[in-house]
Image (spheres, rainbow, N blue to C red):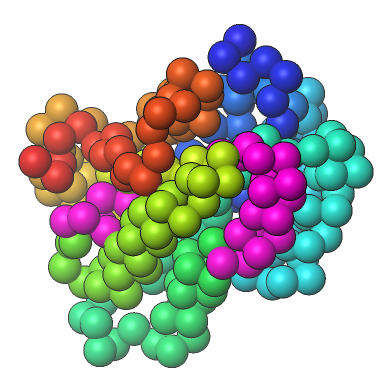
Amino acid sequence: MRLKGKTAIVTGGASGFGAGIARKFAAEGAQVMVADLNFEVAHEIATEIGGIAQLCDVSNSGSVLEMRDSVLNAFGHLDILVNNAGVTHLPLELEDVTMADFEKVYNVNIKSVYLTAQAFVPHFKVRSSGVILNVASTGGVSPRPRLTWYNSSKGWMITATKGMAVELAPSGIRVNAINPVAGETPLLKSFMGEDTPEVRAKFLSTIPIGRFSTPEDMGNAACFLCSDEASMITGIAVEVDGGRCI
């Protein structure tokens, strides 16, 4: 019960790593809002873990503000914000990625962090406490070819994490990131381009531990970083990647 009495939002919490984080937080005692564009599935996860669901487009300011108002009305305050929602473009030569795909990646992976900070940092400052966890990627540390604009969005997120941590530490707010390697999530096929045994074997050959990340892996890492056990840790990006970035 490391998060007993805590309240949390997990964006993109209806599936993949977000669902794993939401389940782990609830198992450790937190009240969790599962925020996602897919409200139906978010509601299913929220019902499963005893939380609440929220329809949210993290790239839209009005939608993020609605999420803020909903969570504060439901829980009274917020302790933990997990910026997990993310998208990628298909593996392509960098000049062949369409403007629409480029803008979607940057709106969801970058603009969302700005919008949630605008929405929740003032609340955290009033309380002189709060934890923000950004779900970045090993691609932001060790980029894979043909995912250049996705990689760069996650590199931005890692730098933003460090900048936020330095600026917000005097206000009692911690900010960290986790860097997953590719995992068994809905985005896996998009990262690989196609899901075949041969492509999977090629991906796995770059991960020394020899398997993909799981939602449980991300939940465990996120739980520690968002718990009081990590009260002296801020501004780091933990590679939960089976050794890929070594």
Say which of 17 and 193 sits in front.
17
Q: x, y (%) of residue 101?
A: 45, 79
The question of residue 88 being in magenta is answered with no
Eyeballing the image, is 89 above or below 72?
below
Say which of 130 and 26 sits in front.
130
Say which of 64 and 172 sits in front.
172
Horizontal side, residue 47 vs residue 225: left or right: right
Q: x, y (%) of residue 160?
A: 41, 61
Q: Is residue 135 visible?
A: no
Q: Which residue corresponds to the image point at 72% horizontal and 19% vertical from the top-left?
A: 5
Horizontal side, residue 75 vs residue 137: left or right: right
Q: x, y (%) of residue 6?
A: 69, 25
Q: x, y (%) of residue 206?
A: 11, 44
Horizontal side, residue 141 vs residue 98: left or right: left
Eyeballing the image, is 122 above or below 14?
below
Q: Is residue 160 visible?
A: yes
Which stretch appears magenta? 114-142
Query: Which quarter of the figure is the N terminus placed in?
Result: top right
Indicate the quadrant where residue 51 lies: top right
Query: Which quarter of the figure is the C terminus placed in?
Result: top left
Q: Which residue corresponds to the image point at 72% horizontal and 31% vertical from the top-left?
A: 7
